Each structure stands twice: as C-alpha cells, then as structure tokens.
Image: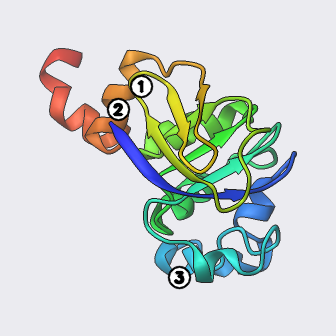
Amino acid sequence: MKLKGRAWKFGDNISTDHITPGRYYHLRSNLPELAKHVMEDANPEFAKKVRAGDFIVAGNNFGCGSSREHAPIVIKLAGVSAVIAKSFARIFYRNAINVGLPVLIADTDKIDEGDILEVDLSSGIIRNLTKNLEIKAKPIPDVMIKILEAGGLVEYVKEHSDVLV
C-alpha cells in the first residue's frame, strides 16, 4: 500500500477533543457533518483545506483523551490517508486500525507543514519528496496491514469469518 499527499503538522498531545471538539458532540450520529470540524481546535483551517490523500503529522501522544471511535473515523472521512506521529495513545492507535485508518510511528522532526510525502505501509518507509529524504517508521504488523487493506476490522472479519471460527 503506497500513499502520497501533503503533510499537515501538529505538535504533541493532540487529544480526541482537538480532533473532534466536544461542542460538536450533538453531531456524533452524523459523522460526515462532524468531519467538517475535524482538527478545528488545533488548526481552524484544516477541515476546509485538507485534500484527499493528505497526512496528519504530529509529535508525541497523538489521540490522547477519551476513547471515542469518532476521532479516527472523522479523520478518515475528511480524506486523510494516514496519521504519522512520534507516538500514539494506545486506544486511538487501535481504534484507527479498526476503522481502516493507517497510523505510523516515526520521528516526525524532519517533516514540515506542506511537505509532500510518499508512504509505503508495507515497508514502513516514508519518503519526504520535498526534502529528498527517507524516514523509517516502526513496521505495522502484518495482521494490521491486512485489516487496513480490508478497510477496517469489520470488513476483515466479514472477509475471513470462515477462518476465524
């Protein structure tokens, strides 16, 4: 799986409240509408300007806070192809994989806002095409790659239910 897009840079401790602001809680049953407000408290322009295929690039502890699944779902609905961060809150990481949103752990210091990235999920290689450099991400386990390829855990289970019993 190869992905290509522009980097949107965020710092450390981006919480699920930054991703899906609590004041939009009433939209939790209308996820496409909630996605129009994704990352609004971290960057008010993000939801308006993000393009399909772009990446969220962050520091440590991305997705901390509540365990709501809405956070990775609306990131995916907004068109983000993957989130790359130095580290993730455990429940966000797993929720992201479960909904089919790739998440990579890597040193993000050499990626700036607007850089064009190419990411190979299978090898874990992130190519910063703007700066002509490679960054090695922590490999995603094979079973998680298969879940991502299926589009998330529900689709994976539907495809493989005969071997999971």
Using the rendered view, name the quadrant where residue 126 is placed: top right
Q: Label 1 is placed on what type of residue? A: Met
User: Label 1's element?
Assistant: helix
Q: What residue type is labelled 3?
A: Glu
Residue 58 seen anywhere in this rendered image of the structure: yes
Tell which of 114 and 43 is nearer to you.
Answer: 114
Give the residue at mark 1: 144
Residue tagged by mark 2? Answer: 147
User: What's the distance in space between the residues labelled 1 and 3, CA to CA?
Assistant: 28 Å
Front disc: 1 or 3: 1
Q: What residue type is labelled 2?
A: Ile
Task: Give the percent coordinates (x, y) of residue 9.
Answer: 74, 56
Q: How crowded is mark 3: few (under 14 residues within 10 Å), some or many (20 or more)?
A: some
Look at the numbered disc 3 and give the secondary structure of its residue.
helix
Q: Of the residues under marks 1 and 3, which one precedes in the sequence?
A: 3
Q: Where is residue 42 in the image (x, y as percent from the top left)?
A: 81, 67
Q: Name the residue under label 3.
A: 33
- Residues at discs 2 and 1 in contact (Cβ within 8 Å): yes
Residue plotted at (65% across, 29% down)? 105
Residue 147 position, x and y percent, is 35, 32
Q: Is mark 2 on a helix, strand or loop?
A: helix
Q: Is residue 139 or residue 26 the one in the foreground?
A: 139
Outermost residue, left side: 162
- Sort mark 2 into few (<14), some (14-19) or many (20+) by Cα contacts within 10 Å: many
- The answer to whether residue 103 is left or right of residue 147 is right
| 138 left or right, relative to 162 | right
Indicate whether 128 appears above or below 94: below
Residue at the image point whose x is 49% and y is 71% from the top: 51
